[in-house]
Amino acid sequence: MVRMVDVARAAGVSTMTVSNVVNGRPGVGPDTRSRVMQAVDELGYEVNAAARSLRTGRTGAIGLVLPDLDSPYYAHLSNRLSAGAQERGRHLLLERTGGTREQELDAVSFAHLRRYDGAVVTLVRLDAADLDRMRFGTPVVFLGESPVPRRFDHVMMDNVGGSREATDHLLRTGSRRVAIVGGRRDDTDDMGSLRTRGYRQAHADLGRAVDPCLVVETASYTWRHGYEAVRSLHADGLDVDGVFAVTDTLATGALRALADLGLRVPQDVQVIGFDNGPETDFLVPRLSSVEPGNDAIAALALDLLERRIRGEGAGTARPTTTTRAHLVLRESTR
């Protein structure tokens, strides 16, 4: 069996340096870290995770809890967080809740979280009152729109500001009747409602009235729902020359529907999505979209989690961190 001392000898460093590298601790220069990892690969050294867990009380793993895995947004988020965790010497374990209350409760239960050193959790059904009643023995960082008690770290995107900028662009570049696909008529704290709030604010800023018929609610945020929403607008005879879709997935469905209807984008109808996923550059036409700060969200979540795992800031209030959103213009807008 290859031992840590063998790796140290091959790399020309101390066993403590090898330990720091394989355990993801800071304070090791990039050249030294590279030399140690090369020796690890060449010798086939394997960290005894079970022994390390018993010795340190840590597993080296962090959990990522998501409502679903079908969404391109969550797939891209998972990739960013997985790469960031690896850079920090940790493993990312993925869990899906299906967006149900029961599975979210299970995912954030005390017994469940003990298998991780920490967890990044996106909530859909649980609210601040639910979390206040729960006991957490593991550091947790929450993502998403759901309000959380101030004793938790919370990272969210600027849903309102990003949607406001997108809608403002459509109105200022000639669109008179802008539909919001995936919007919400009730003003709550979920994603669809917050993005509808930005849509309404952009209209108010320019002294424009919002036609309630152009706030199109969808059962979900799939390609199919985006497609059917635009087909429904057309069938109802509503004169739409701009579409703001609250996700890129809905926007992709909208583009397909407009093509099937023989409408040109952006000449007849401008379209903007939200999330700025990598697929936006490969649609026809290339999709304008709101960039919500995807890289910043992943980095912030992992940095906050690492600090809590190290025991920093215990007992302090933790305000929500909101990343900046901005509009990325491509071919689907004028």
Image (cartoon, helix red, strand yellow):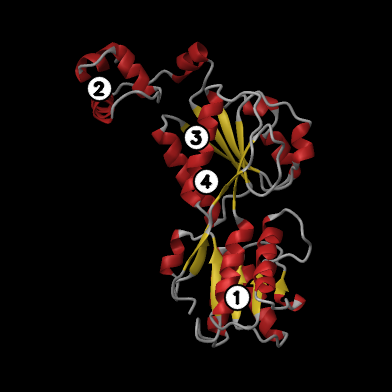
> Which-is-in-front pick, marks 2 and 3?
3
Which secondary structure lies at badge 4?
A: helix
Sooner in the amino-acid sequence: mark 1 or mark 3:
1
Q: Which residue is mark 3?
A: 303
Q: Earlier in the sequence, mark 4 or mark 1?
A: 1
Q: Are marks 4 and 1 in contact (CB under 8 Å)?
A: no
- Relative horizontal placement of residue 183, taking residue 284 as reference (left or right): right
Say which of 30 and 94 sits in front. 30
Q: Which mark is residue 243?
A: 1
Give how far across and how far down residue 281 sits, in percent. 41, 67
Do the numbered discs 3 and 4 sit on residues whose CB atoms are within 8 Å?
Answer: no
**Are the residues at dot 1 and dot 3 in contact (C-beta closer than 8 Å)?**
no
| Amino acid type at image mark 2 | Leu
Find numbered disc 1 in the image and state the secondary structure of the residue it sits on: strand
200 or 240, nearer to the observer? 200
Please tell me whether residue 164 is drawn above or below residue 79 in the rendered image: below
Q: What residue is disc 2 on?
A: 43
Residue 190's x, y, as percent? 71, 54
2 or 4: tag closer to the N-terminus: 2
Alpha carbon separation for disc pair 2 and 3:
32 Å
Residue 251 % position (x, y): 56, 69
Which residue in the structure is indicated by mark 4? 297
The image quadrant of residue 126 is: top right
328 lies left or right of 150: left
Q: CA distance from mark 1 to mark 3?
A: 36 Å
Q: Amino acid at mark 1?
A: Val
Does the CB distance between marks 2 and 1 fall below 8 Å?
Answer: no
